[in-house]
Image (cartoon, rainbow, N blue to C red):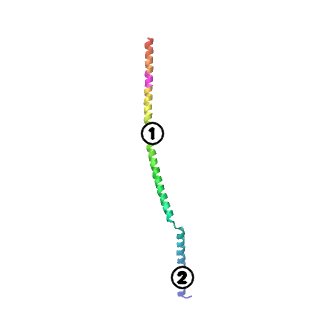
Amino acid sequence: MTRIDFILTTAVILFVAFSMGWFANWLVHRFTRVAQADVDQLERMSQELHEAEETRDQAITYLQQREAELTNQLTQTEAELRAAMDGLRDARQEAEEMRAHLERMNAG
């Protein structure tokens, strides 16, 4: 085998190896390619997920505001109840004092 034959044989082998590699790469990409319909579906799902997250965030914000309002309302109602109970206690005490005073007046 001469030097030229060796160079040509090596060049042919390398060319065949390159061609087979390129063809294998083309086959892999051909079978693993994502269809446009799948990409569109993924984009639609992504958009729906984004909208669902926004809706969730809005619901959380609304619930936090509503909870703050109800807590404020409860605090006000408890304060009014305390005031009413204090007023009732004072009225009962005053009524007892008046009864005691009337009993002393009637007895004396």
User: Judging from the image, what secondary structure is the residue with disc 1 in?
Assistant: helix
Which residue is more in the foreground, 59 or 22? 59
CA separation, marks 1 and 2? 84 Å
Which residue is rendered at x = 44% and y = 12% of the image?
106
- Looking at the image, residue 72 sits to the left or right of residue 25; the answer is left
The residue singled out by tag 1 in the image is: 71
Q: Quadrant of residue 27?
A: bottom right
Q: Dot 2 corresponds to which residue?
A: 12
Residue 91 is covered by the magenta coloring: yes
Which secondary structure type mostly characterizes the magenta part of the structure? helix
51 magenta-colored:
no
Q: Position of residue 44 (x, y in %)?
A: 48, 59
What range of the chain is rendered magenta? Answer: 89-94
Label 1 amino acid?
Answer: Thr
The x, y position of residue 103, in whole percent, is 45, 15
Q: Estimate the x, y position of residue 20 in percent, counting from the top left.
A: 55, 76
